[in-house]
Image (cartoon, helix red, strand yellow):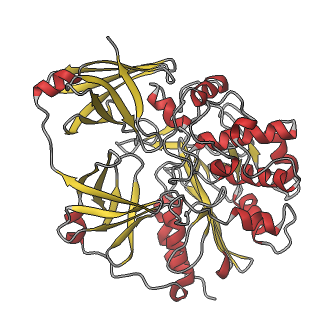
Amino acid sequence: MAMPEAALDKLFAAFDRTDRPGCTVAIVKDGSALLRRGCGMASVDLGVPNTPETVIRIGSQTKQFTVFLALLLIKEGKLNYDDELRKYHTDLPDYATPVKVSHVMTNVSGLREFLDMISLSGADARAPISAAEISKLMRGQSELNFTPGERLMYCNTGFRLLSEIVEKIAGEDIAEVMRKRIFEPLGMANSRLMRLDDEVVPGLATHHLQQPDGSYKKGRWGVPIGGEGGCVSTLDDMLAWAANMAAERPKVGTAEIFKAMATPPKFNSGRISIYAHGLQSAPYRGVHGIGHGGGVPGGRSGTYQFPEHKLAVCVLGNLDNISPYPLSRKIADIVLGDKLQALPPAPKAAELEKLAGLYWDEARSEPMELVVENGELISRLGHKTPLWQLSPGTFVPMSGVHAQEFKPSADGRKLDGTESGNPVSFRRIEPYTAPKADLDQAQGSYANAGLEATYTISADGDRPILDMQGALGRKRMGLTPILKDVFVASALGPREWGGDFQPVLRLARDDGGSVTGLNVSTDRNKKLRFARKG
């Protein structure tokens, strides 16, 4: 098969410069490397280019290693798939519905997400926060986001707890378990668990956050990261792991374990999830896909396979504005060509512009903002995600961690669809100006004991302001009213990691109309209750 090198060069040209960070990329077809190269700089400071051997953080791709180890323990009879977490973590709250090992492997646990809670407590992931403080956060919320199995919601908490279970059963640090049971047997010499960015790793790239003016700052973790996202690796190492997963007779593990990892569960609704066990089930244009992505401060990565075509793609980026998941699909377009089902005609720009706006789902108290950027429809409120039209009139997130699909109404006023097999309905809302009396009633202080945080709403001229003060830090955000008693918070000042932390605050009132508290939601934490003080 002739390799369309020009098309692939064009795809990665924006990253292949000497004045900016970039990525490493490898494409393997039928066991042979079609492309293996570095793009951009591993260190802009030192003028060191990325090469195929550059070591880069892989973030949440680590989750598949943790799940693999748990499934090994299940095969060995040391762990059960349906064990409750509280069997191993007796200090977890007694939730109304048991949370099981199976729930955390598949991102349907309903647990509060700890990285998000760090931000909700007034800090962010770059702040120096100890493992003990993270543990206290995870155990401080007695309520779940939803009943386990009800919906797909990405949750680092579950995988962190799972990695701690692996450690308890194995009797040693999960970094050692990964080394002995995965990395050394497969010859993955440049892969390891690196909990903090102060560790010295030969060949490690600098990770970069792009600023609004186009310049870069160095990305870094302030929190110790374990089996939920702490690994570093290289192209060859990740492809060795991918080949082992796809092998009829794996060197590490068994074909049955990898089949289980690639098999998604059913939601309570009966619909099959798109997230399997530490892996995303990612079909594209009629072809089965499997893999996982990862994001860290200053980096994005992804390794994806299309097994029936024996195609594997690995992209490891040391900057935060690269999107490996859509890139893997564009690579499939180029390499597989007419072997894929045809896409429907691309929506016209005017059709997409008609959909741009702010929408609200009253049943779940969740907003969604759609914008058009570079000819693509983007869901921008919270984590920024492209929406692709993969069938006529139906849009789905170009992501393996959102089990959603939306069908806009003809007039663009509604988005009806499903989320995890459950019906959702968003209606467009117009710009809203809150009456001064409502803003005055919102002013005051609110507390959440589990976060050890107090939120204070005040006014800076005509603009409402949110001050977040917690045990881990403090921050000030601006509040934008979008409906009566509903506000979206946005960062003031310098951009934070990701730039996508936008809590939604909804006032709670008693029967007499007096404000009694706040319900605070983000992408990964829903309706945290804050009681009004005084």
Q: Is residue 297 left or right of residue 236?
A: left
Residue that appears at 56% across and 78% down: 5
In this rendered view, identify the residue nearer to me: 365 or 470. Answer: 365
| Image coordinates for residue 55, horizontal then vertical, percent | 69, 49
- 454 is higher (above) or lower (below) than 106: above
Screen quadrant of the C terminus: top left
In this rendering, position of residue 455 left or right of residue 171: left
Q: Residue 33: tell me if it is visible.
A: yes
- The percent coordinates of residue 202 (x first, y second) are 75, 43
> Left or right of 387: which side holds 356?
left
Residue 440 image-quadrant placement? top left
Q: Is residue 316 visible?
A: no
Q: Residue furthest front?
A: 511
Q: Residue at x 46, y 51 (%)?
A: 321
Q: Which of 337/151 is in front?
A: 151
Percent from the top left, x then y, of residue 247? 80, 72
Total marks in image: 0
- Depth check: 521 or 226 in front? 521
At 67% from the left edge and 33% from the top edge, which residue is drawn? 196
Provide residue 519's location: percent of width, then percent of height. Answer: 36, 32
The answer to which quarter of the image holds residue 479 is top left
